Image: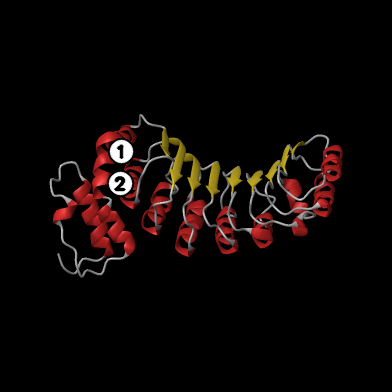
Amino acid sequence: ITTLNNQGAFEMAVALGKPSCNIERKNVLLDDNPITDAGTTALERVQKLKTNQKYWLGKLLLGLKKGVIFSVDLQYKDIGDTEVLLLVEVLADHNPLIRTFFLNGKNLSAKSLIPLFQYALTSKARILRLFLRQCSFGPDVSAAFRQSLVDNSTLEVCSLVDCSVDSNGVADIAEGLRYNKTLRRLNLDRNCLRDDGLATMLSILPHPSLTALCTSRNGITDQLMSNPALAYLTELNLNGNLITDVGGAQLSAALVSSKMERLGLWNNKLSEGARNAIKAFLSNTQCEF
């Protein structure tokens, strides 16, 4: 085969992966074609795709079409872009109710993540809780996710753990949330927000629905601990950051009149005295150190 581009490589991977196809990947010669690593990976995963189709993917897609499956858990499945694209096609065509959707994206690229957001989180989508891990949020993916937040009206919980979300990515998320009225909980643990990213998130508070924010392991310091917008949250996770006794005191003062129910400060730079003072100051809040 000559002059096969990336799009053609993905379409070929889907065709070769169908249970009815008897052509093996090793019998397809692709020398001297303008295919990137993503396209090559999709083709190299054809046999894995067939195995997935045989043992679980085919059943999952059929169950979603019939409306008898309400939870999708792909956290521990060995999947690539092609499997997600097949899933996106079913979600777009049948719009099933999905209460929880778990996805580990360590083998995924923008090729499948952008369509996932464009078609599975549209205004007609019915995904209630979305949990993504290790899905790389480059500029194009972040922009697609921003638009999905604008369009979506059912998503209540969103977790983007270890997704390489930086200050630019969180700016897209915050912009989308300005138009979203349903998201209650947002988890951005293990990303690259730092103080600038947290400031961006706090700029949209108070929010019509968002009351819980998780930002553990994001390099956050004392800089924003006195920000009054923090008082609009009822749950805040700041575990594993760089908050010191000074920031702890500022945070206590900012939250003293708030409705904060749960505050996470594990693995920060707080002394025992500071932790005890925070607990005493925020007596109505469940503090975790």
Q: Amino acid at mark 2?
A: Leu
> Left or right: where does residue 143 sit relative to residue 15?
right
Give the percent coordinates (x, y) of residue 182: 57, 43
Res 115 → quadrant: bottom left
| Residue placed most toward the observer, 210 or 196 | 196
Query: For the N terminus, which image quadrant?
Result: bottom left
Picture coordinates of residue 252 (x, y %)? Answer: 82, 46
Q: Residue under circle 2? A: 86
Mark 1 nearby-residue class (10 Å; few <14, some 14–19, many ≥20): some
Asked whether residue 154 is in view, the answer is no
Q: Quadrant of residue 56?
A: top left
What residue sits right under mark 1 in the picture? 57
> Whole-percent x and y of residue 197?
64, 59
53, above or below 28, in the image = above
Nearer the viewer's eye, disc 1 or disc 2? 1
Q: Residues within 10 Å of mark 2 (few under 14, many from 20)?
A: some
Position in image of residue 68 (x %, y %): 35, 29
Q: Are marks 1 and 2 in contact (CB under 8 Å)?
A: yes
Between 113 and 118, the residue placed more toward the observer is: 113
**Which mark sits nearer the N-terminus, 1 or 2?**
1
Determine the residue positioned at 33% across, 50% down.
85
Which is more toward the observer, 74 or 208?
Answer: 74
